[in-house]
Each structure stands twice: as structure tokens, then as C-alpha cells.
Amino acid sequence: MDPRTRWQRISWSLPWLLFQFFPIADLVTTDRPTAVRVLAGAALLLFTVVYLDVFRRAFGAGCFGPPDMRRLAFVAVLGASLAVWMGPSWAGLLIYVSAASAAVLPQRWVWPAVVGAAGVCAAVVEVSGQLGDLFILPVMCVLTAFGLRGTRHLIAVNSELAEAREELARNAVAEERLRFARDLHDLLGHSLSLIALKSELAGRLAEADPARARTEMADVETVARRALAEVRDAVSGYRQVSCAQALAEARSALSGAGIAVRLPGRVPVLPGPVDAALGWVVREATTNVLRHSGARTVTVTLTDDGTEAVLTVADDGRGPAGDTEPGSGLAGLAERVGKLGGALTGGSGRDGGYELRATLPLVAVPAGAAP
């Protein structure tokens, strides 16, 4: 335990021990046999040590475990015995019994124990004929219990809040990792596929058409530099891809691979998150066409009816294999689109090949409403 924490707990408990002024004063000033004084003093010291240990166990870790019934019972029996034996000056020990009961016991047992302690305290004061003067002692038993229950509740709530903050921090870290992994896959998958394609093309043209080969290698350098800048942006969390930009890149990449491309005549003005999500869809679809499809033609359509935007990327390639699962790129796209309340579907096209379709609402979706 941190020494500062230990001293804080000790300093917190010291004011409560001021109630022991009255039994100690009675022990010193009242004429009693020496043996009685020694025995009562030792019992008071033992009572105090066990009482502090009960509180240490109840509040030491900032949480509440199973109640230590043996120590609590010892404190209750010893406190009541000293009060009955030594008189009204010792009746204040029942305040400690009430406090320990409120700090340790479950809710359903607290108030019977507190009422019992207050009753014993009132009986001791009444027998001595001083109930009118010391009526505050039974009342203090109840008030102290209320105070300790409130303290216990505040500590429990604070502990739950601390756990909630830690959970939110862990979730934020996990979300950032997922974002970075998704962005890195989408960025590098597209760029590296294009670099590999153009490098292969430049290698084939190196002898037959050196000028064209140099042009392709210049494109490779441009793509590599752009990929490096995009990765830096992804690390910083600022990377956004617009749909128009992704369509322009798709035209360049697919045309360079000898694939005919049909693109929308215009790109409507879309909300920023929708525009970025559709840009990522175009990028992933282009990457998959270059890698897997063997297509000769790719058709991209984009419609906007004021309520939702629908993007479709269809090719005339081999189409999906029956025994394959969607890759991590499509899974990441489905997550992006789903967070905006949209849907991503993929499968065989109407005329063969593969068709990827993204549908996104153009109005904000309330948190938690996305599928």
C-alpha cells in the first residue's frame, strides 16, 4: 500500500476516535479498583483495534467484499458489555457498533443492528437516570449509521464510475486499433495492387516500348508516394476518401490494366460521411477487380433520390466462388457502411460476374440505430 494512502485512511478515522474521550476520562477520574481499570482499559484498546480493522477491511480496497461477521460480532458484544458494565460514559461505544454495522452489513441487516445498538445505548443511559442529559447518544447511533451508509454508497458509485472510465478507455483503444487496421488495409490493398500491376506491365514493356515502360514506372512512383502520404494521414486519423476521387483513381487503375470502365456521368453532392464511405467502397471494389475477377468490363452506377444513395460496382468477371468467405476488406466496408445506417451486399450479378452494392441513407442515423 502507498504510505500516503495509509496515512490518509488513518487521518480519516482519527476524528471518530474522539468519542472515546468520555470512556477514557471516566476510566481516569472515577474511583475504581486497579484491576477493573486495567481490565477495562485493555478491553477498550482491544475494542478500538478490532473496530479499526473492521473499517480497514470494509473500505481498504475501495470495494465491498463479504462481511466479516466474526470481527463485527466481537465489536458489538465487547462494546455492549463495556457499556453495561462501566456505565453511561461508555455508552458512546455503541455509536462505533452502529458505524461498523452500517459499513459492513448488507442493507437488509443494517437497520435491525443499528436499532439494536441504539436500544442498548438508550437502556444503559436510562438505567443510570441520565436519559434526559445523554439522549443524544442513542440518536447519534442512528445518525452515524445514516452517514456511513451514505459514505459506503458514494464509495461504491465512485468505484463503478472508475471501472466505467477504464472500460471506456479500453473501448476507445480497441476502436482506434480497428480504425487503423481498416484504413491501412483499404489504403495499402488498393495502392499495392496498383503498384504490382503497373510494375508487371512495365516489365513486359521494358524492351518492346521503353517510353511506355518509363511512363508506367513513373505512375508506380506516384502511387507509392500517394500511398505513403495516405498512410501518414491514416496514422493521424485524418484520412478521408471522396467518392469522386475514388472514381477517378478507379478509371486510371482499371484502364491501365486494360479493363473497360463505365462510370457515372456525375457525382451528386453527398454528406461528408456518406461521400467518404462510398469512396472506400469504390476503392475496395477496384482492388478486388484487379486482384481476383479477370473482368474485361466494370460498370459503376450511383443514384441519389434525396433519401438514400445507392452505389453499385458490377463486373463481368469470374464471379464469387461458392466456397469462399468475404475477406477482411469487405468486412471492414460493411462495418463502415453499417455505422451510417446503411447496408453492403455482394454476390453474383444479374448478367454474371460480381456485383457490390452499397445503400446509405442521406440523413443522420441516431446512435444505436444502425444495423
Image (cartoon, grey):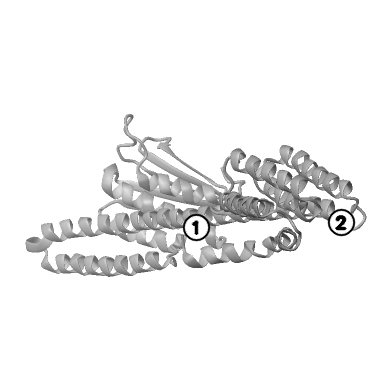
Residue type, mark 1 in image = Ala
Mark linked to residue 62: none
SS category of the residue bearing label 2: loop
On the image, numbered disc 2 is attached to which residue? 134
The front one of 157 and 296 is: 157
Give the percent coordinates (x, y) of residue 331.
41, 44
Residue 296 vertical position relative to residue 214 in the rendered view, above or below: above
Of the 4 image quadrants, the one containing the C terminus is: top right
Seen in the image, is 145 located left or right of residue 167? right
Residue 232 vertical position relative to residue 346 in the rendered view, above or below: below
The front one of 172 and 269 is: 172
Seen in the image, is 339 located left or right of residue 237? right
Residue type, mark 2 in image = Leu
Q: Name the residue: 61% across, 53% down.
A: 42
Give the percent coordinates (x, y) of residue 126.
89, 47
Q: From the image, state whether disc 2 or disc 1 is nearer to you.
A: 2
Q: Quadrant of residue 45?
A: bottom right
On the image, numbered disc 1 is attached to which residue? 169
SS category of the residue bearing label 1: helix
The front one of 34 and 227 is: 34
Give the percent coordinates (x, y) of residue 297.
33, 47
Q: Name the residue: 43% across, 50% down.
A: 300
Give the percent coordinates (x, y) of residue 140.
80, 55
